[in-house]
Amino acid sequence: MFKIFNETNETIAETKEIERVLEIAIANQNLGQVEFNVVIVDNPYIHKLNKEYRNIDRETDVITFALEDTKDITYENYRLLGDIYISIDKAKEQAILYGHSLKRELCFLAVHGFLHLLGYDHMNEQDEKVMFGLQEDILNEAGITK
């Protein structure tokens, strides 16, 4: 399935809720065996990733590394999706900015990253409508509201 790694010095109580929401997301997408990681990091770490891999010199809230972007890696019985990195610092900032809980923000970012691993994107208006609609459907199904 998937694992959540906390690479910060903080205790993150919301990890069980993230697990539950991602299990709902997997079921929502009718997926069988999938493997991926969620890695929770701080702003300096995600800034470094963003600069190194996307050439964007600032922190971000979530960044994904999708292994299915290359068709060189395929497995018969399961899908190896990749990694989702979430900045706990940005999640806290955005929870305050958007006026909702840290739990909601972390779950949103996890689902957002998960959908990116599956190939969803928001580069144009139509794709954004599809992806953001799925995010809200999954979060609503999990009872995670604003």
Image: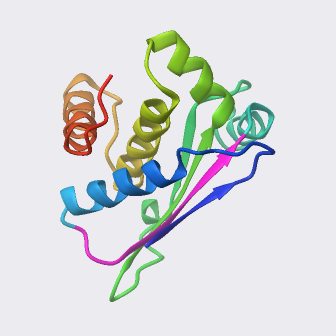
Q: Residue at x 24, y 44 (%)?
A: 138
Instruction: Give the quarter of the figure containing the N terminus.
Output: bottom left
Q: Which residues are magenta?
A: 31-41
Left or right? Give the position of 119 relative to 105. Answer: left
Q: Quadrant of residue 78?
A: bottom left
Figure quadrant of residue 34: bottom left
Q: Nearer the viewer, residue 141 or 42?
A: 141
Please state the horizontal and vertical placement of residue 5, each as a whole percent of the image: 65, 59
Depicted 35 relative to depicted 108: above or below: below
Question: Does residue 117 sit above or below 14 in this rendering?
Answer: below
Q: Nearer the viewer, residue 110 or 47?
A: 110
Residue 94 image point, x, y percent: 54, 19
User: 43 above or below 82?
Assistant: above
Residue appearing at x 20%, y 33% in the figure: 133
Please identify the dominant SS of the magenta region.
strand
Residue 33 versus residue 38 in the image, above or below: below
